[in-house]
Image: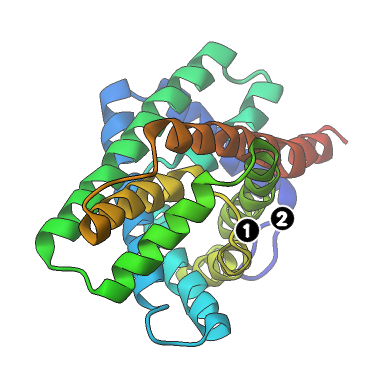
Amino acid sequence: MSSGSFTGVDEAAAEILNAANAKAERNRLKSFVLAILAGVCIALGAYASILVRLGVSIGLGKALAGLVFSTGLIMITFIGAELFTGNVLMTLSFLEKRIKFSDMLKNWVVVYLGNFAGALIIVLLVFLSASQTQNFLNISYSIAANKVNLTPLNCFASGILCNLLVCMAVYMAQCSKDASGKIFSIIFPIMIFIVRGYEHCVANMFFIPSGMASEYLLNGSVSISLVLAVKNLVFVTLGNIFGAFLFVALPLWLHCKK
């Protein structure tokens, strides 16, 4: 049942299922290119989220960071790029036996690598495009250092909370029929995750390398090891998968089974 500018749960779930089927069947090269584009969008939002925090109070800075970071997901939604954390909703199609687990997993691997490539491209371009201020370098390094020093449990739990919000934003945007509805559906859940500082694996693909580059420019050396970076990404990724599946995909599937 739908009304006004919004679709009902059944219709939105059906659209998510159709999108998942298309992604599972999509050419791997095309998925990789669309994933690079999504990584670029998230990285640009992450970069902007650091810039708006410079010279403002902590509370206002976090609110502004959440607002500009959401632009990344907004761009992805309108251009149809492939974001790993959003593609976890393909589990809904797997539960419905519309796609094979192997096809879903192949998509995840391709998209994850593409997202990482896109994020690293923006890290490179950011530091090649202009000299970054001391304040930016300090904040960028501080963000990365805080992330890699989280315990595996911190990363996993924070990843759950993060992708619960991200996939809820994706789902609500799917429910909206017009552009303004989609934009507002995305902004507020994303603001919650940024204001609280939850862990998003694709955003961390920008934040951590950016922090490593910033530390090198500040000190001439890098204390953030690849082992610490990988540890963060592994447990955050698992949390992101679990959060999207348990709190969004599974409830949608149970609703559709009614």
The total number of labels drawn is: 2
* Image coords of residue 97 (percent x, y): 67, 18
Classify the position of the N terminus by image quarter.
bottom right
Q: Position of residue 212 (x, y in %)?
A: 32, 49
In the image shown, does 6 or 44 lie closer to the viewer? 44
Residue 106 seen from this side: yes
Q: Where residue 52 appears, x then y in whole percent?
A: 38, 78
Residue at (49%, 16%) from the top-left corner? 103
Q: CA distance from mark 1 to mark 2?
A: 10 Å
**Colouring scheme, one of rainbow, by chain, secondary structure, one colour:** rainbow
Q: Residue at x 39, y 53 (%)?
A: 207
* Residue hosting label 2: 8
Disc 2 residue crowd, few under 14, some 14–19, many 20+, Cα 10 Å: few
Tell me the element at label 2. loop
- Amino acid type of the residue tagged 2 in the rendering: Gly
x, y percent for residue 157: 71, 44
Q: Secondary structure at mark 1?
A: helix
Q: Residue at x 29, y 50 (%)?
A: 40
The answer to whether 230 appears left or right of 194 in the picture is left
Amino acid type indicated by mark 1: Met
Is 125 on the left-hand or right-hand side of 35?
left
Mark 1 in CB contact with mark 2 (< 8 angstroms) = no
Earlier along the polypeptide chain: callout 1 or callout 2?
Answer: 2
The residue closer to the viewer here, 90 or 159, is 159
Residue 89 visible, this angle = no
Q: Quadrant of residue 110?
A: top left
Q: Is residue 71 above or below residue 73?
A: below
Please tell me how crowded label 1 is: few (under 14), some (14-19), or many (20+) other residues with Cα within 10 Å. many
Q: Which residue is mark 1?
A: 172
Rendered residue at 66%/43% (across/down): 13
> In this view of the protein, which residue sits in the foreground, 182 or 139?
139
